Amino acid sequence: DIQMTQSPSSLSASVGDRVTIACRAGQSISNYLNWYQQKPGKAPKLLIYTASNLESGVPSRFSGSGSGTDFTLTISSLQPEDFAAYYCQQSYNAPFTFGQGTRLDIK
Amino acid sequence: EVQLVESGGGLVQPGQSLRLPCAASGFTFRGYAMNWFRQAPGKGLEWVAFIRNRDHGGTADYAASVRGRFTISRDDSNSILYLEMSSLQAEDTAVYYCSRVKGGYCSGDRCYGGWFDAWGQGALVTVSS
């Protein structure tokens, strides 16, 4: 199985801050990396697919980059609705593993 | 509008079985691969099972933790995805989500590169005596 490791596990930030979340794969996964946002009690929501493609309807303050084993999700200017958990997920091989998640809280 | 609606969750005793349906609407269900995921209380997301569309054989893959106990299936005529769960254990307690696979490729037994663009609201399964 491909292990996915996110950092940090939790993060406190303020509205307007620029935030970066890192995700590292245990082996090269090309660009088969997706990012999801999850709010409490809700289903995950796709933000970024294949490392850098913005899902339709997702604000442009979200962006993704990386390839191989190292990836990042960046939120350029945090908005109140962005405080949530974020997960990376690889689709290079089944099982389609997730990172452990990053909880983004209001400072 | 793409919609996925899970049902069938509830409280079951260890060793019992349960079937979760996921009703799909707003898209051509038979054309898409589908997944089940789960999330234990306070924990992260875990992929459970994947089923290819008919064009790619309609075959399935499973997480090691459920292989041999869970079965994913699909009824393309009625646009319903199923997860049949047997020999349930306390560790299976979770919210179960169905999701649609978009993009990706299948080559032989391997499907890869897709992303999960639509999710249901989730169905809570609690396994306890």
Image (cartoon, rainbow, N blue to C red):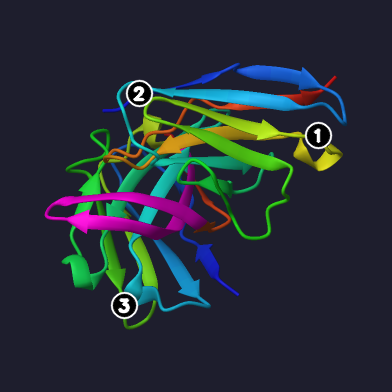
Of residue B92 and residue A42, the one placed in the foreground of this image is A42
Taking the view exactly as shown, the residue that stands out farthest to the left is B108
Q: Which residues are magenta?
A: B93-117
Compared to residue A57, the image places residue B17 above or below, namely above
Which chain does the numbered disc 1 sit on?
Answer: A
Q: Residues within 10 Å of mark 1 (few under 14, many from 20)?
A: some
User: Residue A71, position in %: x, y?
Assistant: 49, 28
Residue with the mark numbered 3: B76
**In the structure shown, which secondary structural element does the residue marked by tag 2 occupy?**
loop
Disc 2 to disc 1: CB gap under 8 Å: no
Disc 3 to disc 1: CB gap under 8 Å: no
**In the structure shown, which secondary structural element does the residue marked by tag 3 occupy?**
loop
Whether residue A87 sits left or right of residue B59 in the image: it is right
User: Residue A101, position in %: x, y?
Assistant: 55, 27
User: What is the three-letter code of the residue carrying label 2?
Assistant: Gln
Which chain does the numbered disc 2 sit on?
Answer: A
Please tell me whether mark 2 or mark 3 is closer to you in this view.
Answer: 2
User: What is the three-letter code of the residue carrying label 1?
Assistant: Leu
Of residue A75 and residue B66, the one placed in the foreground of this image is A75
Residue with the mark numbered 2: A3
Is the residue at mark 2 from the same chain as the one at mark 1?
yes
Residue B97 is covered by the magenta coloring = yes
CA gap between label 2 and label 1 equals: 28 Å
Is the residue at mark 2 from the same chain as the one at mark 3?
no
Which chain does the numbered disc 3 sit on?
Answer: B
Residue with the mark numbered 1: A78
Q: Which image quarter is the C terminus of chain A in?
A: top right
